[in-house]
């Protein structure tokens, strides 16, 4: 083992770590590469290192936004920890300075902040704010959406609750179709342009509102990621969010933009994904998490003075022991320093454009690539068994992720069928990294082609014939 990578807390062998995990950690807490998990002991920028000193290019960690172990962020944390680490009932400058800096990136009316500890907690508070302001309860969400793991938030996360045995969707939850213009009810294959697709999906939301009102129910909020991550790296069709926001507000609800995974310049063209030209909306409430603290547990809800006043009108104070503590705020300020100082948003735009261009070129050569979508450092590559049926190549995607790991690159999958290669690296990911990634992906595509259109078995990392895969997918599977 490389002594430079030693962590004083990492004293066990990998096998011993696995054994203790199996004894003491809940089995539902899963790992990447569960049959041969990685033991990561160090991070540096966009790279991670295992206990043997092997180096991996991290292409999926959108938590370490400004890079693993960023020295500026680390120094800020250590400095504040050496002074005071207490709750937010005491005045301290870091909170108010950060709130001022942060809200300068938002439209003027989004000026009030609540600091909490995770994206899940931010979305939970956003629901409370929405219900306090509207005096309604019901929520519209998307199919395949994920907004967190708290009880109320699981209820509005079909990505999670559809997998829970015996779970029944709550009456106050209304699920709209995932607005995907590739694999969706309305798509490009039916010769619709993006704007037409957006209107058709928005009409589905209008129908949900109408049905709810016929039953005497009323909409408190529509919640959506501004770009949909777990659903398969989906960019909403042009005009979709604008029309949905109009419909929801006309029904007396408010609109929540979940920017936990896509905010802080990731899309390259703007700080927030709700500002993307396809969206171009102003939410009533915005939730932030993950990148805000570069891995430190801090998150935020940003809203309007009017909604904040409604929440205050409930009478009970809002207190969060760790939300907005001096250390968290020092770290959040340091992260924003790095985003601004190193022009990470501009770099995301340049690198993302390079990747999208090269991926589209590969798609022209390899029919297993059904769709390339995204912008900046938020990209999805959907793999299919054939382009006509769009049959999801889930097992192939799993195999591709394995081949990336063999080349020292960490990738993962998303989407309802786990057939979308997701790409959300630290923002320090640069053009050299992008060239390396494209070269490796090209070699993987060539390997697939050379094997005479062979696909992947679910029980093995070896290639097997396409006919043997037919039996792996449930009969009548919807796609």
Image: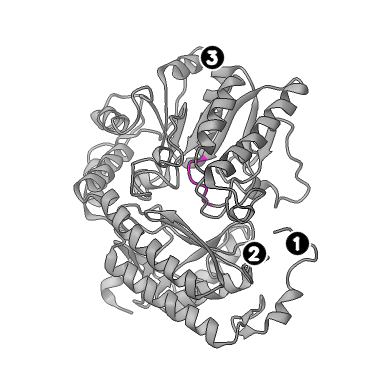
Where disc 1 sits, the SS reads loop
Q: Position of residue 312 (x, y in %)?
A: 47, 15
Mark sitting on residue 314:
3
Residue underneath mark 2: 390
Corner quadrant of residue 110: top left
Q: Main secondary structure of the magenta part?
A: loop
Q: Is residue 256 left or right of residue 44?
A: right
Mark sitting on residue 18:
none
Q: Is residue 320 left or right of residue 108?
A: right
CA gap between label 1 and label 2 equals 12 Å
Image quarter (top left, top right, bottom left or bottom right) of the N terminus: bottom left
CA gap between label 3 and label 1 equals 47 Å
The region drawn magenta spans 225-229
Q: Position of residue 190 (x, y in %)?
A: 64, 53
Q: Position of residue 194 (x, y in %)?
A: 53, 46
Q: Residue at x 26, y 39 (%)?
A: 333
Q: How is the image coloured?
A: one colour
Residue underneath mark 1: 477
In front of the other: 354 or 471: 354
Q: Return the disc, 1 or 2, that comes first in the chain's sequence.
A: 2
Task: Tell whether position 47 is magenta.
Answer: no
Q: Are marks 1 and 2 in contact (CB under 8 Å)?
A: no
CA gap between label 3 and label 2 equals 50 Å
Asked whether residue 187 appears in the rendered view, the answer is: yes
Q: Return the disc, 3 or 2, that comes first in the chain's sequence.
A: 3
In front of the other: 164 or 1: 164
């Amino acid at each position: 083992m490389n002594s430079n990578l030693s962590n004083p807390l990492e004293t066990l062998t990998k096998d011993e770590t696995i054994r203790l995990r199996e004894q003491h950690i809940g089995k539902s807490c899963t790992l990447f590469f569960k049959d041969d998990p990685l033991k990561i002991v160090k991070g540096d920028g966009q790279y991670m290192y295992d206990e043997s000193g092997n180096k991996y290019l991290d292409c999926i960690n959108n938590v370490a936004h400004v890079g693993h172990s960023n020295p500026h962020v680390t120094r800020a944390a250590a400095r504040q920890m050496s002074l005071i680490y207490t709750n937010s009932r005491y005045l301290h400058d870091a909170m108010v300075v950060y709130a001022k800096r942060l809200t300068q990136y938002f439209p003027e009316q989004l000026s009030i902040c609540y600091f909490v500890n995770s994206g899940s907690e931010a979305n939970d508070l956003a629901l409370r704010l929405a219900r306090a302001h509207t005096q309604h309860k019901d929520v519209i969400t998307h199919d395949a959406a994920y907004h967190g793991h708290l009880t109320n938030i699981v209820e509005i996360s079909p990505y999670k609750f559809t997998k829970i045995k015996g779970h029944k969707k709550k009456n106050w939850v209304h699920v709209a179709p995932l607005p995907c213009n590739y694999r969706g009810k309305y798509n490009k294959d039916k010769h619709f342009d993006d704007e037409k697709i957006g209107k058709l999906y928005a009409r589905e939301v209008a129908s949900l509102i109408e049905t709810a009102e016929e039953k005497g129910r009323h909409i408190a909020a529509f919640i959506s990621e501004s770009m949909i991550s777990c659903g398969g790296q989906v960019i909403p069709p042009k005009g979709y969010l604008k029309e949905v926001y109009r419909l929801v507000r006309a029904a007396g609800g408010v609109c929540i933009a979940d920017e936990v995974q896509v905010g802080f310049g990731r899309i390259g063209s703007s700080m927030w994904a709700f500002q993307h030209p396809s969206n171009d909306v102003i939410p009533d409430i915005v939730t932030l998490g993950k990148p805000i603290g570069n891995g430190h547990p801090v998150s935020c809800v940003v809203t309007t003075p009017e909604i904040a006043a409604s929440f205050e009108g409930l009478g009970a104070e809002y207190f969060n022991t760790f939300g907005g503590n001096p250390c968290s705020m020092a770290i959040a300020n340091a992260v924003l320093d790095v985003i601004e100082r190193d022009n990470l948003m501009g770099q995301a735009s340049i690198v993302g454009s390079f990747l999208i261009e090269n991926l589209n070129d590969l798609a022209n050569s390899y029919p297993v690539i059904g769709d390339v979508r995204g912008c900046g450092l938020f990209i999805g590559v959907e793999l299919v068994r054939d382009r006509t049926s769009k049959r999801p190549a889930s097992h192939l995607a799993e195999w591709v992720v394995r081949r990336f790991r063999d080349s020292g690159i960490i990738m993962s999958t998303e989407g309802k069928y786990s057939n979308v290669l997701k790409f959300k690296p630290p923002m320090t990911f640069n053009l050299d990294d992008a060239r390396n990634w494209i070269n490796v992906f090209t070699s993987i595509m060539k390997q697939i082609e050379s094997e005479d259109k062979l696909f992947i078995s679910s029980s093995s990392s070896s290639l097997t014939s396409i006919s043997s895969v037919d039996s792996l997918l449930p009969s009548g599977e919807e796609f």
